[in-house]
Amino acid sequence: MIGFIHKIVVETVKRRFKKDAAKPHKKLKDEVKILEVSISHTISEIFFIVIGVFSAGFGLKGFLLPNSFIDGGAMGISLLISETTNISLSILIVVVNFPFIILGYSNLGKQFALKSILAIVVLALSVHFIPYPVITSDKLLIAVFGGFFLGGGIGMAIRGGAVIDGTEVLAIYLSKKTGLTIGDVILLFNIVIFSFGAYILSVEVALYAMLTYMAASKTVDFIIEGIEEYTGITIISIKSEKIRLMITENLGRGVTVYSGKGGFGNHGVTQTEFDILYTVVTRLEIARIKTEIDKIDQDAFIIMNSIKDTKGGMIKKRPLK
């Protein structure tokens, strides 16, 4: 697949440069690389969105919709209106999400809005036309697995650079305008939906809806952030060179080195200069690297902070030696 893409890109760029033989070869290679990256990313995004749409459709028609369950967010509003009126869920998915997409266009850009509109329309069509099987009538299984497949679909769509539930777009917008965080906005939004669900349908349905929402939100987090959590470690030590060699040569990890000097001391005293090291490991590797640092310098100052994901470098290529 990669070879096929490369061949198409090369031929396209060659035709573009054919009229001007004076164009340097390096620029041709740069154009090829840029187009390859764009095409491969586009294919990857389309794949995530398609998988997300069908996963969300399965969660809706295979679990939630046949059993009169609702969820949070814009999808919860669509399900709630569908349960209390004769309006098709397919129509409501588009209508309810449309204002959020318009908001996303002004805040997140044209490309995001276009991909989201296409994803939502395809989701609406799949819910309307695809005969997903009804899996179970057990309420607990419906809440958990309905939320799982719906959340998986939402997470996959986000990985593809789109949304099929516009709540987060509203949350991002309101967080900029108010002092609330994105999580606070989503929580308040869902409290309103679940309150209406309890009033219009029943308290039991609202409680199951909360369970569905929790399953969906945790699945979204898992899809976006992955199973591994990374930790960035900053190391300040007068023996930084020995620690650097230990990390790079013994553990096989990459290190970024910053120049620094101590800021604690009396006026007029020369501040000590040293290198500050920064590396990234998985949470399962923290104990090992702390042990190795202590072997070199027990007084080393270590700062650790959580990282959602990484790209490039050595961390995903191989484990610690």
Image (cartoon, rainbow, N blue to C red):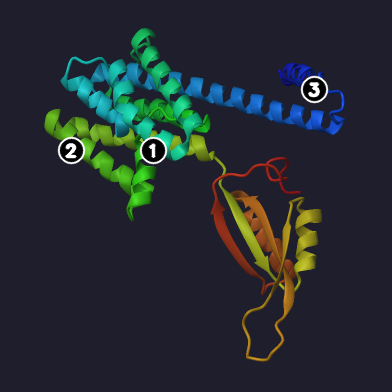
Task: Tell me the kind of residue under disc 1.
Answer: Val
Q: Is residue 128 above or below residue 267?
A: above
Picture residue at 25% right of the left edge, 14% below the top:
88
Residue type beneath disc 3: Phe
Disc 2 element: helix
Q: Label 3 neighbourhood size at 10 Å, few (<14), some (14-19), many (20+)?
A: some
Q: Residue at x 68, y 41 (%)?
A: 316
Q: Give the label on residue 259, or none.
A: none
Quadrant position of the N terminus in the picture: top right
Task: In this rendered view, identify the residue nearer to me: 67 or 153.
Answer: 153
Would you identify the image quadrant in which residue 98 lies? top left
Asked if marks 3 and 1 touch (Cβ < 8 Å), the reply is no
Residue marked by disc 2 = 195
12 vs 253: above or below: above
Q: Please provide percent x and percent y for residue 84.
A: 16, 21
Residue 140 in picture, x, y percent from top left: 29, 28
Q: Please report whichever mark, 3 or 1, sits nearer to the chain's N-terminal start.
A: 3
* Residue depicted at 31% across the width and 46% down the height: 185
Q: Which mark is residue 17?
A: 3
Q: Depth check: give the residue in front, 104 or 299.
A: 104
Q: Name the secondary structure under disc 3.
A: helix
Residue type, mark 2 in image: Ser
Nearest to N terminus: mark 3 or mark 2 = 3
In-front residue for pair 1/105? 105
Q: Are marks 3 and 2 in contact (CB under 8 Å)?
A: no
- Calculate the distance from the C-alpha at mark 3 to the C-alpha at mark 1: 41 Å
Q: Nearer the viewer, mark 1 or mark 2?
A: 1
At which x and y percent is residue 188? 26, 45
Determine the CA span between mark 3 and mark 2: 62 Å
Q: Is residue 70 visible?
A: no
- State the mark number for residue 169: 1
